Amino acid sequence: MRLRAGSWGFQAPEDVTYYDLNYLLENGLGEKAIQNTQLYDLVRKLSRMAFPTYEDKYDKRWECFYVSVMRSRHLITVPFSILEYQKDFFVWFQQLGNLCVKHGGERAENEHGQIFRETMRFIPLIKATDGKIFEKTIPYDIRTGKVKGCYVMKRVMPRKEKKKIFEDYDEHMKEQEEMFDISLNDYLNVAAVCYRAAFKGKAGGLSPLEMYKKWADGRDGGMLSVKKGSSCKEFMKWKENGRWAGSHPFEIVFSWHEHGIHLYPPYKEEPHYSLGVTNYAYAESFVEMVKALIKNRVPFKARDLENVLNYLSGETYFEVNSSNDIFRSFTYAPSRENKKLYFGHIEWDEIKIPRWR
């Protein structure tokens, strides 16, 4: 049920709409900084109307304020949170954008003030309904929750395949021997096993060094400057001097988002290669690399294998209407088809109500 203006005895102003809010927050493009004394005082006044949900000596946070606006002639409420840090206020609106409100600058209240005035005007209705108003006014395209990947992914790994990979990996771990000193050529050859498995025909005809230059991060920290590629002593000397710290010589698959796939060489503390993935856009490539390393009897550990297989088989939870992880998130847009396909599988987050002073 959607509420029309005037329901519950509350009339939202027609000139404060969801689209105005979207415009004031600049459509979610970064963080908008505003230095305005009256606006600062207004945000501070609002924050002091409720107890913080978190507080330490550095900052205070309020996670559950709500502004009422009109959208398509219906009253809706939009959640937002406030953080007070070093006397500045940071205001975060789900999916819409962020504000940083600072003291000083212009004294006359700007157009953003209506957001916080409308929030305060809505508080008596929240109190009168004990928050029940939110069940009818927070749209499901704004509410957050979680859903298992198997319900929203286009393709999932069969359980039988997942089980076999686990079994093969466990057997490999029992049989593999320890490895300590390796040369640059040894490292590039193992990386080439990974490249051929993940990129198949694209790696055809390329040498291990060419593959590395094609797919790796590029900041090799001097690794490719090791003069004698077949010398274990020279490679280990370069690795142990630590001057490559801050570079990414072992990110064998580069990613603009976080990190891609890493292949770490053996260390004294861990006498084997170590394969890991951060960006799950490369999850399938990572699994192909794991299978190839097992087949080629390379001593290694796959640090993220369980998490990756759970993700590919649809066992991982995706965040609903949140952009914290672009590869494990799902946007729910209300429609008859989406309600039929997804709604019953989504576990919606509990709506939080401020603890009023």
Image (cartoon, helix red, strand yellow):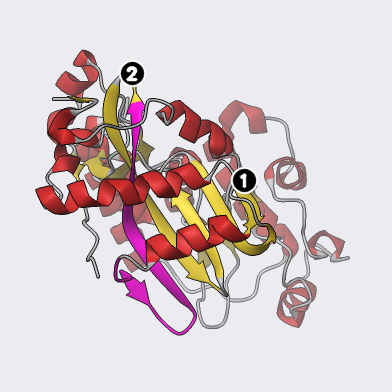
Residue 72 is labelled as 2
Give the percent coordinates (x, y) of residue 310.
28, 47
For disc 2, the neighbor class at 10 Å (few under 14, some 14 to 19, many from 20) is few
Query: Is residue 147 visible in the rendered structure shown here?
Result: yes
Residue 66, horizontal then vertical, whole percent: 32, 47
Q: Which region of the structure is painted magenta? A: 50-70
Q: Earlier in the sequence, mark 1 or mark 2?
A: 2
Along the line of sight, the residue nearer the viewer: 178 or 21: 21
Image quadrant in which you'd find residue 7: top left
Secondary element type, mark 1:
loop
| Residue displayed at 34% across by 51% down | 120
Which corner quadrant holds the C terminus?
Answer: bottom left
Q: Amino acid at mark 2?
A: Ser
Quadrant of the frame with the N terminus? top left
Q: Which residue is mark 1?
A: 255
On the rendered structure, is 103 left or right of 164? right
Mark 2 falls on what kind of element? Answer: loop
Q: In which image quadrant can residue 177 be found?
A: bottom left
**Is the C-beta separation of discs 1 and 2 under 8 Å?**
no
Asked if 279 appears above or below 171 in the picture, the reply is above
Q: Is residue 64 magenta?
A: yes
Please report the residue visible at 21 percent of the width from the left and 56 percent of the height from the top: 353
Given the image, on which type of amino acid does mark 1 rest? Answer: Ser
Q: Which residue is at 65% across, 56% downward?
A: 107
